[in-house]
């Protein structure tokens, strides 16, 4: 269906449409209820164990709070505002995001509040990670390690999901209703840096990542089928449905291989050829760099920074292939999975609406 077949709906009808004046902002919350509860429970215990460490953590939390309040002073992205450059509404922001199709970095095209919020999110991720590491190495506090690690990873996925939304919004092959929905989700993410899709998708991708790290892909045949089956056995129905319905798609298969093997589509093909020519049936992760003749980080750890770093490598490679019309995946596995989740949620909404009518 063509884009012009859709009726344009002013999304400002869903938000506060009155023109906003400069007014004192309510206190901006940088932490979720769960994060606040964990920190409030942990801090008195740290104070008893190590007052110096307690003061360091409290200083960091105060700095984050100050940054959050500065962010809260910027105009909401979910309201109509008269800015220096003219009127801005949620609908006009969504239109701008969809219309912007340049291949370059979009940083200077994005709202100031979005960029400041990203800095706040990164600072919060590092703070949560510091709590996790401190608890990991303190026998009295070890029970808090996993909860703080989980919150660190969930916050990292909010950073990742922002990237995926921007990728999907730019994809003109997607229905315009999906692109507008992703743009609206992006505004909500920028406003609160706490995304419902992150909460749904993060545990699945985290489990896949952890399983990928523990398993040993068949570097030789370069087939990840056995690993994929093992991973899928540990997953929920949503992931299994994704595998069943999308693994016949060449792009999804290639993106999955990149994720599993930890190297690019081009490196996978090169390694296949080298091992086939040498008659070598299989090699380990630690031998990949030697056979490729270049350093590659195929054996990444479980750290959230490894996950995000390797995601950005796959993302940049996919964008380059898409821009230059090269073979290989033009999206990441994360793109494909969140796209699939969105489609299924939309189908469920439509079915529920039909059932009610």
Image (cartoon, rainbow, N blue to C red):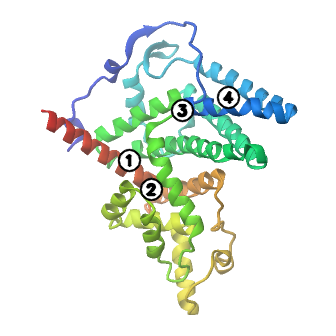
* Of callouts 3 and 4, the N-terminal one: 4
* Of callouts 1 and 3, the N-terminal one: 1
Q: Residue drawn 31% across and 47% down?
A: 343
Dots 2, 1 in contact, CB < 8 A? yes
Dots 1, 3 in contact, CB < 8 A? no
Q: Quadrant of the C terminus?
A: top left
Q: Residues within 10 Å of mark 1 (few under 14, many from 20)?
A: some
**From this viewpoint, is residue 328 visible?**
no
Q: Identify the secondary structure beneath mark 2.
A: loop
* Residue where numbered disc 3 is placed: 193
Distance (Cα) linking label 3 and label 4: 21 Å
* Of callouts 4 and 1, the N-terminal one: 4
**From this viewpoint, is residue 277 visible?**
yes
Q: Residues within 10 Å of mark 3 (few under 14, many from 20)?
A: many
**In the rendering, at what x and y percent does residue 98 appear?**
39, 36
Dots 2, 3 in contact, CB < 8 A? no
**In the rendering, at what x and y percent does residue 30 appear?**
60, 27
Q: Residue drawn 59% across and 16% down?
A: 27
* Residue where numbered disc 4 is placed: 40
Which of pointers 4 and 2 indicates the residue nearer the eye?
4
Distance (Cα) linking label 2 and label 1: 10 Å
* Of callouts 4 and 2, the N-terminal one: 4
Residue at far left of view: 357
Tag shown at residue 171 = 1
Tag shown at residue 331 = 2
Residue at far bottom of view: 279
Please name whichever residue, 330 or 212, is drawn nearer the observer in this view of the structure: 212
Q: Quadrant of residue 67?
A: top right
* Of callouts 2 and 3, the N-terminal one: 3
Q: Quadrant of residue 242?
A: bottom left
Q: Quadrant of the N terminus?
A: top left
**In the rendering, at what x and y percent does residue 219 appear?**
56, 79
């Amino acid at each position: 269906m063509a884009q012009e077949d859709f009726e344009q709906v002013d999304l400002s009808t869903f938000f506060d449409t009155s023109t906003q004046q400069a007014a004192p902002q309510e206190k901006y919350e940088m932490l979720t209820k769960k994060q606040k509860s964990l920190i409030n429970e942990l801090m008195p215990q740290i104070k008893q164990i190590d007052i110096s460490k307690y003061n360091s953590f409290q200083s960091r939390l105060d700095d984050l709070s100050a940054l959050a309040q500065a962010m809260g002073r910027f105009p909401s992205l979910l309201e109509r505002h008269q800015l220096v450059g003219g009127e801005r509404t949620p609908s006009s922001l969504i239109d701008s995001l969809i219309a912007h199709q340049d291949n370059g970095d979009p940083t200077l095209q994005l709202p100031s509040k979005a960029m400041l919020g990203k800095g706040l999110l990164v600072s919060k991720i590092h703070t949560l990670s510091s709590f996790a590491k401190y608890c990991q190495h303190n026998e009295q506090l070890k029970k808090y390690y996993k909860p703080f690690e989980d919150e660190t990873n969930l916050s990292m996925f909010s950073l990742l999901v922002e990237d995926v939304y921007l990728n999907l919004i730019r994809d003109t092959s997607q229905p315009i209703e999906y692109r507008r929905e992703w743009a609206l989700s992006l505004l909500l993410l920028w406003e609160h840096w706490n995304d419902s899709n992150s909460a749904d998708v993060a545990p699945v991708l985290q489990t896949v990542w952890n399983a990928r790290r523990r398993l040993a892909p068949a570097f030789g045949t370069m087939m990840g089928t056995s690993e994929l089956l093992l991973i899928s056995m540990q997953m929920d129905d949503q992931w299994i449905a994704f595998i069943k319905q999308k693994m016949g798609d060449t792009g999804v298969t290639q993106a999955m291989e990149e994720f599993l093997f930890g190297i690019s589509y081009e490196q996978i093909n090169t390694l296949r050829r080298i091992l086939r020519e040498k008659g070598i049936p299989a090699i380990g992760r630690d031998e990949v760099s030697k056979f490729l003749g270049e350093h590659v980080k195929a054996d990444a750890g479980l750290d959230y920074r490894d996950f995000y770093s390797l995601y950005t490598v796959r993302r940049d490679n996919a964008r380059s292939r898409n821009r230059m019309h090269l073979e290989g995946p033009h999206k990441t596995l994360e793109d494909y999975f969140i796209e699939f989740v969105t489609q299924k949620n939309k189908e469920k909404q439509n079915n529920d609406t039909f059932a009610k009518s």
